[in-house]
Amino acid sequence: MAAYSFLVYKLAHVEYWNELKISFLNPEIQRFVYFAAILFLMPLNWAIETAKWQLLLSGTVSQSFGDALKSVLAGLNTGFVTPNRIGEFAGRILLLPPAHRPAGVAMSVINSVTQNIIIVVVGLAGAVVYFSEHYSNLTLKNYLIILFSVISITLLIYFLFPSFIGKLKTDRWSKNLRNAVNSLAAIKRNKLSAVLGISAVRYCVFCLQFYLMLLFFNIEISPLQALAAIPVMYLLITFTPSLAAAEPAIRGSAAVFIFSVYSPDDVGILLTGILIWLVNFVVPMLVGSVLIGIAPGSDKNE
């Protein structure tokens, strides 16, 4: 019930509901084509995440796509009330056999790391363009040096991590911890590459959704400007400490900070961040509750 208590509270305190209602009363067909596309991409977004979760688990336990989807959506519930969604792993391992849950926790960490690598790499690349154009006095050469260094170190750590873990002595560790470490050490580099590629595809999907939402609220921004600005915004959001329940304010304020250089419509920009949160997080979380039988008021929430 904690997730729903947070949700009701946050929805009750979201400002600009009247402006949001007015935006849907606008009869322009093109705007609703944009919104229909956003809704279409929402299940695709989570289907891609489910495929990635299946792939990560494939060396440990076999899950059907349906069960993997339930695990992913269950993770949204458990992550909702924890800082930066760190509790998401708890929901993801619910449907795993108890013996495989330690490995599931390890795979959940890898899953999160891969998505964050994409966010960092693309976000820093976008920052080269965005901040050099609007805010920073640093030269492009300095940006590229920083960018190349961060990307190289990040990818090196990512691909060498399983080998490093495999060299650690686990004989004195508990059985559960040993199982998790062994699962990490067994990941092959081709699987790491595939998971990273899937993360990149998913990243493209939710960036496209955000761009379409900007267009829905009549925020005039070119595709090239969006290619630089949207990754920077997701970079800021990802590494801002927060509860998922506080994301509407964080997403809205980050969006205003980034996109106000392109448009004076701060309310429209703010609503873009809030509505994307509702579509991409709240709706799947509610669907997940139904799928796994923990709808509001259920005894399983006690």
Image (cartoon, rainbow, N blue to C red):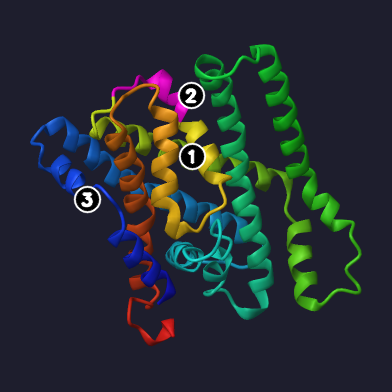
3D distance between C-alphas at marks 1 and 3:
28 Å
Q: Does the magenta portion include 226?
A: yes
Image quarter (top left, top right, bottom left or bottom right) of the N terminus: bottom left
Q: Read off the residue under disc 2.
A: 228
Which residue is pictured at 50% across the width and 17% down the height? 134
Q: Which residues are magenta?
A: 220-229
Give amino acid for label 1.
Answer: Tyr
Q: Which mark is residue 17?
A: 3
Give amino acid for label 2.
Answer: Ala
Residue 136 in percent (x, y) is at 58, 18
Crowding around mark 2 (Cα neighbors within 10 Å: few <14, some 14 to 19, many 20+) is many
Q: Which mark is residue 203?
A: 1
Residue 301 in percent (x, y) is at 42, 81
Q: What SS does tag 1 mark?
A: helix
Which quadrant of the figure has residue 198? top right
Task: Tell me the chief SS of the magenta region.
Answer: helix
Q: What SS does tag 3 mark?
A: helix
Q: Is residue 34 above or below residue 264?
A: below
Task: Tally the marks.
Answer: 3
Q: Earlier in the sequence, mark 1 or mark 3?
A: 3
3D distance between C-alphas at marks 1 and 2:
14 Å
Q: Is residue 262 left or right of residue 111?
A: left
Crowding around mark 3 (Cα neighbors within 10 Å: few <14, some 14 to 19, many 20+) is few
Give amino acid for label 3.
Answer: Trp
